[in-house]
Amino acid sequence: MPSPPPIEIGVFIPIGNNGWLISDNSPTYMPTFELNKAIVQKAESYGFDFALSMIKLRGFGGRTEHWDHNLESFTLMAGIAAVTKKIRLFASTAILTLPPALCARMAVTIDSIAPGRFGVNIVTGWQPAEYEQMSLWPGNAYFGYRYDYAQEYVQVMKDLWTNGKSDFKGKHFTMTDCKLSPSPSSPIEIIAAGQSPRGTQFAAEYADYNFMGASGHNTPQTFSKGSKALKEAADKAGRDVGAMVLFMIISEETDEEARKKWEWYAEGVDLEATGWVAGQAGKDEKADKTATAKRIGGSENPVNLNGGALIGSFETVAKLLDEAAAIEGTKGIMLIFDDFLEGLDKFGKRVQPLMKSRAHVGGVAA
């Protein structure tokens, strides 16, 4: 079997309380700058390529108060930019809340702190309650045109970053001699997260990466259909856009130890919180079966929002990550952990050195 190509590795930092496990039995913590700084600095020390922070404006409640406590993405990443040196950083914009011209200027400001290291993740929105609480939800019809809205949003930012001005005239945004200076030190990369055919088209035409979620346990190939669709759309658009796939990592000395830990987390699932998520995800009644909301709202593995999990020994996880890296169209793999600081150490010291796709960073164990 040929070796997988080199792959970028990133960390999806816990900007919301308790990370990505909705369980009474998993590690609990509040989101703080100090915690996230420590996580990104540790990731940087292990040669990680990027760190991404989400934006979440309302949590899921339940016994665990999951994601009821959140920091803001751009200001957090500005702080982290000042205390890191090499790792690339992505902040998320909830496009219904932040005008594109202002977002573009905020991005340039962080680029001045970390030249060439900053990018923007586009969040169109799938959870109406986040925006209804601020009277910013345009109604459920928005689900049908959100990528048209996002397309205009990104075009305005690209105009400003490239030309220093925008006179864009669209259905959703109108710019009149809108100015931006200074310009970014280098092109600012864009991450999208579209899984539906329309979302994939948007990513192929306007983004550099498309965020994807795998599913199941130890089944890294589950995102291959989406990756293939993205590559086909990007080829048609004449652009180089790759999949950035998310995995939760539960790794221990043995497969059995890791499996028992996962089962303990799953036993403590907060069904009140996950039920609320499912209700919100169901608001998009016309969502394609591949849409993010459909996956998040499912019932297969609600303890981690039905995301893909790689569970096993350090050797098992390394092998599975190499399998993911070998899937055509994959540019990056983004990791989440049950305990981020401990998990990063296990990955950096025990998993990454076994990965053929990371030989350029940590080497391959003999």
Image (cartoon, helix red, strand yellow):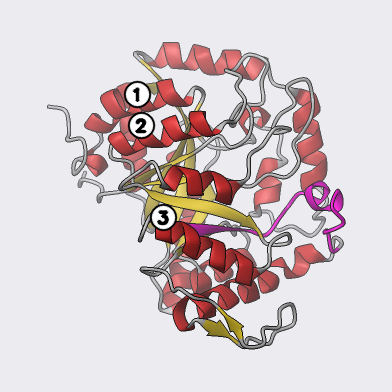
Say which quadrant the N terminus sits in: top left
Rendered image: mark on residue 113 = 3
Q: Is residue 260 magenta?
A: no
Mark before the other along the chain sequence, 3 or 1: 3
The x, y position of residue 255, in whole percent, is: 39, 16
Residue 82 versus residue 319: which sits nearer the camera? 82
Secondary structure beneath dot 3 equals helix
Q: Which of marks 3 and 1 is in front?
A: 3
Q: Is residue 200 visible?
A: no
Q: Which of marks 2 and 1 is in front?
A: 2
Give the amino acid type for the residue marked by disc 1 in the picture: Asp
Rendered image: mark on residue 258 = none
Q: Is residue 123 magenta?
A: yes
- Label pair 3/2, CB-CB below 8 angstroms: no
In the image: residue 308, left or right of residue 186? right
**Which contiguous range is marked in magenta?**
117-138
Question: Residue beneath label 2, please?
Answer: 42
- Label pair 2/1, CB-CB below 8 angstroms: yes
Quote the CA–CA distance across marks 2 and 1: 8 Å
| Residue drawn where x is 81% and y is 35% of the image | 276
Q: Which of marks 3 and 2 is in front?
A: 3
| Residue drawn where x is 55% and y is 68% of the image | 104
